[in-house]
């Protein structure tokens, strides 16, 4: 089989270096753009163009390190130039998730439900969202998507498609599995403060740990319990949660257009 033969003969060192460099640049840009913008749960997402810009860089920073095993496995089979088409397809799936989250945010914000205010039921809603994220960690769909992400060789060999279009399709398909694996953790990030550097780094570390480190399935269950506890903590005593910004005390922020 061509895929297996290529795996034995190709060493995509430059792809690995470029992927790590891209992730590092994305982190630097994200830190620069997000610094001082943490308004806690319910942070204003600004205009669509501004949100998309920061969402793409933030997603690249958070997801590229954990996607590296899959990208590098693909690069060992395909020509290395096609690996970046694969990455592009992968990011398209996450852009779609970001657009859906933005649309939901605008729908809720446009309705102006006063009960979501932080001095009313806001902590309960944020806490419930985090609990839902924790319970999803225990679902069969989560486990299936996580197993896919942890078995790059299996996917590349059995899901192989030729050509540039094939690379794009494979990247997008893998991205959908990744969204299926991580949407709960990203929901928790939105609930805790999507512009928080602290929570962004914490969620990125959690995603990397369960996808790349040994015993990832067990780590996912530990994260489930941690999220449920955190969600209850936010709902019942939000002001005592370390790293959680109180929206009522957050400084006013200047958003892009």
Image: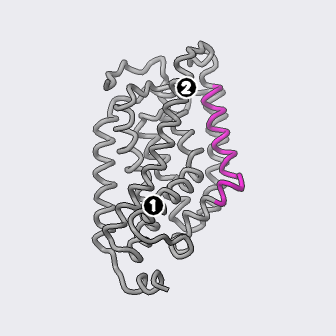
Q: Give the residue drawn at x 33%, y 75%.
A: 12
Q: Give the residue drawn at x 42%, y 34%.
A: 195
Give the x, y percent position of residue 34. 34, 35
Magenta region includes residue 113: no
- Image: 39 above or below 60: above
Disc 1 is placed on an element classified as: helix
- Image: 115 above or below 73: above
Mark number displayed over residue 149: none
The image quadrant that residue 127 belongs to is: top right
Give the x, y percent position of residue 212. 50, 64
Mark number displayed over residue 239: 2
Would you say the magenta stretch is mainly helix, strand or loop? helix
Dot 2, how many residues are within 10 Å of its Cα: few (below 14), some (14-19), or many (20+)?
some
Give the x, y percent position of residue 156. 50, 72
Q: Which residue is mark 1?
A: 67
The magenta region covers: 124-144
Dot 1, how many residues are within 10 Å of its Cα: few (below 14), some (14-19), or many (20+)?
many
């Amino acid at each position: 089989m061509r895929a297996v033969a290529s795996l034995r003969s190709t060493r995509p060192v430059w792809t690995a270096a470029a992927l790590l460099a891209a992730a590092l640049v994305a982190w630097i840009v994200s830190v620069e753009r997000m610094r001082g913008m943490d308004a806690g749960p319910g942070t204003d997402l600004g205009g669509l163009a501004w949100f998309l810009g920061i969402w793409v860089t933030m997603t690249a920073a958070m997801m590229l390190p954990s996607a590296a095993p899959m990208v590098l496995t693909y690069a060992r089979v395909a020509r290395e130039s096609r690996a970046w088409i694969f990455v592009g397809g992968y990011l398209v799936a996450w852009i779609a998730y970001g657009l859906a989250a933005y649309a939901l945010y605008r729908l809720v914000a446009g309705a102006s439900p006063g009960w979501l205010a932080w001095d009313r039921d806001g902590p309960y809603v944020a806490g419930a969202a985090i609990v839902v994220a924790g319970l999803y960690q225990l679902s069969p769909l989560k486990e299936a998507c996580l197993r896919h992400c942890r078995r790059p060789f299996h996917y590349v060999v059995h899901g192989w498609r030729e050509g540039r279009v094939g690379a794009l399709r494979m990247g997008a398909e893998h991205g959908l599995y990744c969204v299926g694996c991580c949407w709960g953790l990203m929901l928790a990030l939105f609930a805790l403060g999507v512009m928080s550097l602290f929570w962004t780094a914490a969620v990125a570390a959690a995603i990397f740990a369960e996808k790349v480190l040994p015993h990832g399935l067990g780590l996912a269950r530990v994260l489930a319990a941690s999220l449920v506890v955190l969600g209850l903590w936010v709902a019942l005593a939000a002001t005592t949660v370390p790293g959680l910004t109180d929206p009522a005390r957050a400084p006013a922020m200047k958003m892009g257009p």
